[in-house]
Image (cartoon, rainbow, N blue to C red):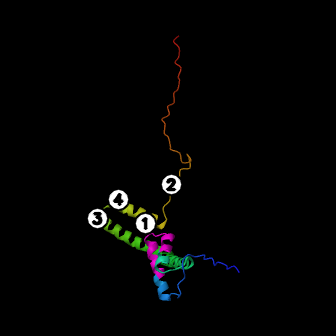
Amino acid sequence: MTEKKSKKSKSVKKDSQKPSLAQMEVRVNEIVSMISQGHNYTSILRYFTDKHNCCDKTVDNYMKRARQRISEVYGAEYRKSLVEQSLIQLDDLYRRNKSNEDLRECRAIIETKNKLLGTVTDKIDITTQGEKIQERPQFLFIEKQLPENE
């Protein structure tokens, strides 16, 4: 009789015990930290297979949870709060520069606020299709015939 060899799809053995919810949260937080430090998928996978003896699928699940947590923290609400905070800071800067009579800086602050809010209009040149406008002096020569001397 021939024995069938069992093929291992993963080179890492699974833990004999499932991690607790607290351990899973710690691992997901570790991945969030590693992502914020610039680690790529391969280095995170290597770290977790070496340190926690996790398989690829487990690390993928942790990565998925970490990405969900990042999007919850830094999603639309976070961007909205950042815009609001920036507007408050710009208003304060404007007030201080106005009292110092630094009108140039006030103008720059207004432009920055408009960019932040998306209320800036761009000027588009439709006459030359974006090509440089060339101004050439034009001279008009008029030939005038003088009367002949009789």
Quick one: which residue is furthest to the top in this view? 150
Rendered position, 3 above or below 101 = below
Q: Which residue is mark 3?
A: 100
* Residue 65 x, y percent position in the rendering: 53, 79
Q: Is residue 57 visible to the viewer in this orientation of the structure?
A: yes
Rendered position, 110 above or below 140 = below
* C-alpha span from label 3 to label 4: 11 Å
Q: Is residue 36 magenta?
A: yes
Q: Which residues are magenta?
A: 27-46
Q: Is residue 11 magenta?
A: no
Q: Earlier in the sequence, mark 2 or mark 4?
A: 4
Front residue of this view, candidates 106 and 84: 84
* Residue 124 x, y percent position in the rendering: 53, 53
Q: Amino acid at mark 1?
A: Lys
Q: Amino acid at mark 4?
A: Arg
Kind of element beneath mark 1: helix
Q: Which residue is mark 1?
A: 113
Q: How many marks?
A: 4
Q: Which residue is mark 2?
A: 123
Kind of element beneath mark 4: helix
Q: Earlier in the sequence, mark 3 or mark 2?
A: 3
Location of residue 56 by image quarter: bottom right
Label disc, if present, on residue 104 of the rendered structure = 4
The N terminus lies in quadrant: bottom right
Q: Is residue 105 left or right of residue 59?
A: left
